Image (cartoon, rainbow, N blue to C red):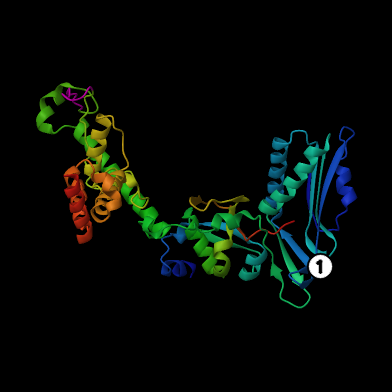
Amino acid sequence: MDHLKLIPDKLSVEEVSDLVLDSRCGAVSVFVGITRDSFDGKKVVRLEYEAYDSMALKAMQSICDDVRDKWPAVHSIAMYHRLGCVPVKEASVVIAVSSPHRVDSLEAVSYCIDQLKASVPIWKKEVYEDQEPVWKENNECISKEQIKPPENIDKNLVQINVSSEELEKRIQNFIARKREQVNISNIHDFIPSKGESETEDMETCARVRTQFVKRSDSKGHLKIRRVYNEWGPQTVSRHHPYIKEESSQNLPHSIAERVQAIESFLNTGPVAPDIYKRLKDMEDKIAYLQSISPEYAMFWKNKKVETEELPETQSEYTFTAEDIAKRIELLEKQQ
Amino acid sequence: MQTQQVRRRGYNMEIEHGVPVKLIFFAQSRELAGVRQTTINLPTKIAYQQLLNLIANRYNLESIKNNILLAKNEEVISDNCDIELRESDNIAVIPPLSGG
């Protein structure tokens, strides 16, 4: 059983929880919402509640239906909300749920109060001791989320900046134009010009003067119309221009496509295009270092064997005059 | 006079052929509008935004226009479709909820 009520009188927690009692239920979970005496340091005197009664009761009923979907074990639900003036420390809402075991009723009662705050048209005004009263707003309230403007949209991605009415008008115009085009092509297809079918007209009782002509390039008899888009989503690369993709970074689209086609034909797989640039950079760097540093001589061993020997022979000329004299002496002795 | 007002604001509506609809205000919107409920002539078909603009403009609700929902016959209306109205329908202005 669902017990749903909006009442102007003081709520009795016991009365509400008694409503859901049942001999088969080992658990009754109760939530009691109480008015606080302060908000943001401001002293609250009382709260004033009002509701769109008929809609509120509908919304509460739909919460109950949801609960029974989610927790089939739930036995009874009671939701009482107080309206009008509620002094501080008194209950504004009491929800009681019974079930054979505690898990279902505990979860269900928590769901009920969350949903009640989010979707039941009830409003409260906080009346303060020394400030203007304020209509409150639940954080759970759906309207806030629905109305929140979309954030973080790159302005470059927005192509049309018009009101939704204008947009609607443009869409309607577009649909109207397309319908017109379809009409015209239907007329062409099904009512061929008089010259062609004048003679047959006389002999046929068909409602439309349709002429079925076998088309050479198609199995159907209808004319095939191909659309060549000069510009549009179909002609633009499917990669988004704002999401930079490496494969099309340096090469024009047409070239990149050819490269990819050849690569896949040669089974070399697509290679990141910047690998060539990196290879070239590395080669250039090595060449540069070779040209300035003898430490990289090992790189030129194969090519420059002759030049390597030269310094050795030349080094003999670095002997001093004394050394040469000694050497001559030695040679003379040997002889 | 209503017709004139509406025409001047560029709303493309035929008020003369409209239907009387009950308009109900709650909470903050009730205080701003200064009435709890009233009857208004509306066309049989109107876009959500048009209706919202019209109500906000005529009932002093511009300040909370972006925070209210509209409900037709106790059902919240989605804001991207046209609303079809018949006599004795009621439209409720629903400010942000604060029950519980």
Q: Which residues are magenta?
A: A210-219
Q: Is residue B77 visible?
A: yes
Please tell me whether residue A214 belongs to the stretch shown in magenta.
yes
Q: Nearer the viewer, residue B25 or A138?
A: A138
Q: Specify the subunit that label 1 lies on.
A: A
Indicate the amino acid at tag 1. Asp
Q: Horizontal and vertical percent for residue A58?
A: 69, 47
Q: Nearer the viewer, residue A156 or A104?
A: A156
For label 1, the SS is loop
Q: Horizontal and vertical percent for residue B24?
A: 63, 60
Instruction: Specify few, some or many for label 1: CA neighbours under 10 Å numbering under 14, 14-19, or 20 or more.
Output: some
Could you tell whether A193 is left or right of B66 in the image? Answer: left
Q: Where is the C terminus of chain A found, in terms of image quarters?
A: top left
Could you tell whether A201 is left or right of A246 in the image? Answer: left
**Which residue is situated farthest in the bottom direction here?**
A130
Could you tell whether A298 is left or right of A153 in the image? Answer: left
Q: Residue at x 77, y 65 (%)?
A: A47
Q: Residue at x 78, y 38 (%)?
A: A104
Please tell me whether residue A234 belongs to the stretch shown in magenta.
no
Above or below B27: residue A12? above
**In which image quadrant can residue A303 be found?**
top left
Residue named by callout 1: A37
Q: Horizontal and vertical percent for residue A325?
A: 19, 57
Q: Is residue A233 visible?
A: no
Q: Horizontal and vertical percent for residue A194?
A: 12, 32
